[in-house]
Image: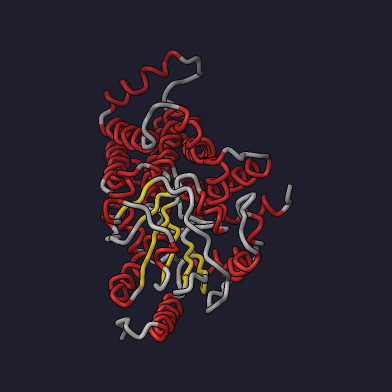
Amino acid sequence: MDPSLALVGLLGGLITGISPCILPVLPVLFLSGGARGARLAQEGNEPASGGRRPYLVVAGLVLSFSVFTLVGTLVLSALPIPETVIRWSGIIALALLGIGMIFPRFETILEKPFSRIPQRQVGTDRGGFVLGLVLGAVYVPCAGPVIAAITIAGATGSIGFDTVVLTTSFAVGTAIPLLVFALAGRAVAERTAAFRRKRRALNVGAGIAAITLAGGLTFNLTDALQRAIPDYTTAISESIEKTIPAPVIAPDGAAVSQRLTSCVEDAWTGQSGEQDCGPAPQLTGIQQWLNTPGNTSLDLQSLRGKVVLVDFWAFSCINCQRTIEHITAWHDTYQAQGFEVIGVHTPEYTFERDTGNVMDGAGRLNVDYPIALDNNYSTWTDYGVSAWPTSFLIDANGTVRQVTIGEGGYETTEELIQTLLDEAAAKDPGRKHS
């Protein structure tokens, strides 16, 4: 085992726990996990469990998220059920729990099935942990190198000791800031007279927060919120990622040329200017194509003479969504001049493997260029990708000329697109270019 893995996972989790990606779940943690626990403790009926509630909610969240991320894809692929079942079950359960917080009688009905399980007390202990389990099922943190390593190991069945260490340390890192926020909610409730006087209002507020989160996830409003808020953790994240050797999280057995590997490693450390990375690998193992005539397949050989951007993305990845705003603009601006974009959609979570979900996500993001569904990570592996988003800019001769990882550097990439289009036009005087 690489001793750096635990540190990598811990730091990755800490960054995720303070990033904008967790903002949608914070109101639920603050009110339902922290403040409501304090209220239950103050009532005197369940002092111990009310005090434990923040810990139980966060423990449930990190446990279910870790389990679903590691083995969710393997379990669902072995069962004849939709790949979206985990997410939708979580959303429905979250809405029901929210209704139960507002209407105590309904909450009693929800807890009834658990009353047969021997336990000192039914209610707050179990309720807090169940709430955490539900939040973990719908929790979608920002894509990053640690998440990529965990997700791909789980989806491909290559779960070893190192992966478990990485997942555990990431869960611990994520739990720390989330627990701090939940405990802050409890502290505010304990020290604020308004919370003590208006216990019913607190319950209703907690329920509304849970239902609002469920609704936001249903209609993808949480994505819009996360895109609207600048990622204030980018500088910290990049400074830490640059200290991590790319091979630590690269796919095992990737048949990637040394030249392309060197370019990926350079991009990993922030060097994303013009390069010569050798021939672009072909697009292999694609399950389905979207946004092509008749959804027929494309190959890079047929696009020779054009400048091509191969972008690895996932529709729920907030970092990808921010990058796609620039990619769609380039596609619209330069397509007539011989520029083509291929979005290789490689799923980060199980619900992203569903074709209908990808189509909906692409529609929301105005993605009208060709999309290749890489559910088995075949092309991802052939290109040596390690994180979402990663893009490869290919010239008219089929040579990779730039690799970029993550957000930023848009001006540099656009200038290189223009340069490569000029080069292609010089070799083909009949091509329209301005």
Q: What residue is shown at x 61% (from left), y 53% (from top)?
A: 254
Q: Quadrant of residue 239?
A: bottom right
Along the viewing direction, whichever of 63 and 151 lies nearer the viewer: 151
Task: Please count the marks in the image.
Answer: 0
Percent x, y of residue 213 = 31, 45
* Residue 190 image offset from top left, x and y in percent: 43, 44
Which residue corresponds to the image point at 67% horizontal and 44% vertical from the top-left?
162
Of 221 and 86, nearer the camera is: 86
Please give left or right for residue 194 compared with residue 172 in the image.
left
Q: Nearer the viewer, residue 317 or 152?
A: 152
Percent across and percent down for residue 125 are: 47, 28
Q: Is residue 195 visible?
A: yes
Q: Give the residue displayed 36% in from the left and 58% down from the top.
A: 226
Q: Residue 51, relative to residue 417: is it above or below?
A: above
Query: Quick check: 13 left or right of 107?
Result: right
Q: Position of residue 253 (x, y in %)?
A: 64, 50
Q: Is residue 383 above or below residue 169?
A: below
Res 197 visible: no
